[in-house]
């Protein structure tokens, strides 16, 4: 048996293999096989990467935005040419189906496309004659070295939420991808290198807490983008801001879908099932809780249970592709299976039990599970499960259903299925969530809009994506100008 390769770091344009270093295994979750090793970078490695980014910053900032955009246009073309290869790498290390991986890569490419319009996005405002003969203008300038720390669940998309926008704005960057899925991030960075990105503008380090702490504390780091679980997001925000950094930190979620009595049963059931079990429920926008409000049709529960039981689960690294793949690690699969047991012990009724699934490829599988009669105080209602489990709750009416959602500490996504414009309007206006869906179960905002979690789903002020992303990665300067004619009077004259 050959020993899997240790992933390289990228520092100042050189892919470096680190030897004699602690590593963490990268699995193919479909088989359990170890396919690579992630090096646990130390403070010294992080320092090298930040120094490289700092050294590359002055020249990259002086590169005209249109030239920076041209690098991104070439990057976008290379992503298209290598689309299938990147999607397959994503599936191999993450375990999601190929169709889901294509979606992961496509959403990331859309951010690159957005960032290609940076000359327009960076344009400022001007006003002539703010006072007589005096003009005012704003410009947006980059911050310097920015950092991205990303989770395992979208190996392509989440890093691409960050550095294309940061680089387009003229910053340099250090990325620390999830130690569970470093391969896709590396493959994509190699494409950016081929697109002509100068050395040191993008750097990659790997690791866990020690590596992240050094990034949070490093005096030359100006801003930190983080996506991951809420406890870590809170820690990153508090530690980063204490060290004077600008921080945006997306956290965990618990997303609700209200099904009103007037909703189309087929459409709402199909959509909730896709929303709950897509990517095996490992999505921060998974529609993990359905609230049946009022007298919903009796057959809705049997439809949900039947649809869940019908989902074909299996290894995603081969044909034929299943409809749902494995979870990321054995520990996570076991944790989710245990939570299902806790839910049942606390009184939830199991309509479909994913623990019954048999799959002998060696991977980390769990079938689609539906729990009915879930109550607010149960562990399955409080914890983000992040697996293929759909909770079903009841509410007397819309008012009651919105009340349940608004009690949640999270506020990422919330949706309603209804034919009533009045109910939809009421829901949209009153629900406490940053991303709202009307007859859409996963209202994840796309590249041109902010990815806008509320509550414990987000720490910071400016969200990722869209123009908020551009604001996050820039600082504004206002210049007020007055020119004197030869021999003109005092600065203080009133005319
Ligand atoms: P995670 O918090 O375990 O890890 C995220 C990143 O933080 C990784 O790079 C990891 O190496 C690092 N990290 C982990 N523990 C750390 C610690 N103690 N100190 C410093 N750094 C640490 O998250 P995950 O399991 O990789 O991803 C799943 C989570 O991410 C879920 O909670 C999901 O909801 C969330 N998520 C949120 C969004 C969003 O936009 N709100 C998007 C995707 C995923």
Image (cartoon, rainbow, N blue to C red):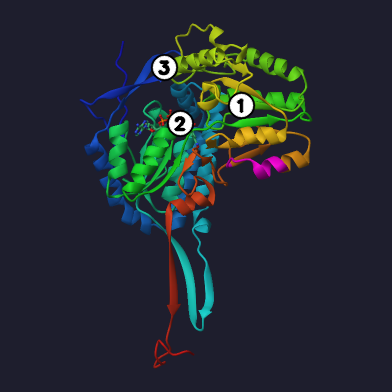
The secondary element bearing badge 1 is classed as: strand
Q: Is residue 324 left or right of residue 74?
A: right
The secondary element bearing badge 2 is classed as: loop
Q: Is residue 190 left or right of residue 105?
A: left
* Disc nearer the start of the sequence (2/1): 2
Asked if one can make out residue 357 in the rendered structure from this viewpoint, the answer is: no
**Residue 124 against residue 93 in the figure, above or below:** below
Q: Nearer the viewer, mark 3 or mark 2?
A: 3
How many residues crowd mark 3 within 10 Å: few (<14), some (14–19), many (20+)? few
Q: Nearer the viewer, residue 55 or 461?
A: 461
* Cα distance in 3D space between marks 1 and 3: 23 Å
* Disc nearer the start of the sequence (3/2): 2
Say if mark 1 contacts mark 3, CB within 8 Å: no
On the image, the x and y values in percent for residue 209 come to: 31, 32
**Residue 299 against residue 403 in the figure, above or below:** above
Q: Quadrant of ligand 1?
A: top left
Residue, x 49% and y 83% (percent of image)? 133
Q: Which image quarter holds the N terminus?
A: top left
Residue annotated with mark 3: 331
Is residue 207 rendered magenta in the image?
no
Residue at mark 1: C-beta within 8 A of ligand 1: no
Residue annotated with mark 2: 155
On the image, the x and y values in percent for residue 460 come to: 45, 46
| Disc number for residue 289 | 1
On the image, the x and y values in percent for residue 207 come to: 31, 31
Which quadrant of the figure has residue 206?
Answer: top left
Magenta segment? 426-434
* Cα distance in 3D space between marks 2 and 1: 25 Å
Residue, x 51% and y 26% (percent of image)? 282
Asked if one can make out residue 59 in the rendered structure from this viewpoint, the answer is: yes
């Amino acid at each position: 048996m050959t020993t899997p390769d240790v992933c390289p770091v990228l520092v100042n344009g050189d892919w470096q293999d680190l030897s004699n270093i602690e590593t963490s295994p990268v699995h193919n979750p479909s088989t359990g096989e170890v396919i690579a090793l992630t090096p646990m970078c130390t403070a010294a490695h992080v320092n090298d990467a930040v120094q490289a980014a700092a050294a590359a910053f002055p020249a990259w900032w002086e590169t005209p935005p249109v030239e920076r955009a041209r690098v991104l246009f070439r990057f976008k073309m290379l992503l298209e040419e290598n689309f299938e290869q990147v999607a397959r790498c994503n599936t191999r290390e993450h375990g999601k189906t190929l169709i889901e991986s294509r979606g992961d890569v496509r959403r990331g490419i859309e951010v690159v496309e957005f960032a290609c319009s940076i000359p327009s996005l960076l344009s400022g405002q001007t006003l002539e004659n703010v006072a007589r003969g005096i003009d005012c203008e704003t410009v947006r300038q980059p911050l310097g070295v920015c950092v991205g720390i990303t989770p395992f669940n979208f190996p392509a998309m989440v890093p691409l939420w960050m550095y294309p926008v940061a680089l387009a704005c003229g910053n340099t960057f250090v990325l620390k991808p999830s130690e569970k899925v470093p391969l896709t991030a590396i493959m994509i960075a190699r494409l950016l290198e081929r697109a002509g990105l100068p050395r040191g503008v993008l750097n990659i380090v790997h690791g866990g807490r020690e590596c992240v702490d050094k990034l949070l504390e490093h005096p030359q780091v100006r801003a930190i983008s983080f996506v991951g679980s809420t406890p870590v997001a809170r820690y990153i925000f508090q530690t980063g801001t204490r060290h004077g950094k600008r921080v945006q930190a997306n956290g965990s979620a618990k997303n609700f879908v209200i099904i009103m009595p007037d909703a189309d049963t087929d459409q709402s059931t199909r959509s909730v099932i896709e929303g709950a079990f897509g990517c095996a429920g490992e999505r921060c926008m998974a529609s993990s809780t359905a609230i049946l409000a009022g007298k919903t049709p009796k057959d809705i529960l049997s439809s949900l249970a039947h649809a869940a039981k019908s989902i074909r689960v299996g290894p995603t690294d081969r044909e034929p592709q299943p409809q749902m793949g494995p979870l990321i690690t054995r520990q996570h699969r076991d944790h989710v299976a245990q939570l299902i047991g806790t839910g049942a012990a606390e009184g939830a009724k199991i309509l479909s039990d994913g623990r019954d699934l048999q799959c002998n490829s060696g991977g980390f599988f769990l079938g689609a599970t539906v729990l009915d009669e879930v109550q607010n105080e149960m562990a399955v209602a409080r914890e983000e499960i992040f697996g293929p489990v759909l909770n079903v709750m009841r509410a007397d009416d819309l008012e009651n259903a919105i009340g349940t959602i608004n009690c949640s500490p999270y506020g990422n996504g919330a949706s309603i299925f209804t034919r009533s414009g009045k109910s939809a309007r009421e829901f949209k206006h009153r629900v406490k969530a940053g991303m709202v869906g009307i007859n859409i179960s996963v209202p994840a905002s796309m590249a041109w809009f902010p990815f806008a979690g509320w509550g414990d789903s987000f720490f910071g002020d400016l969200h990722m994506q869209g123009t908020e992303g551009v604001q996050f990665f820039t600082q504004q300067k206002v210049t007020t100008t007055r020119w004197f004619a030869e021999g003109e009077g005092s600065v203080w004259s009133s005319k």
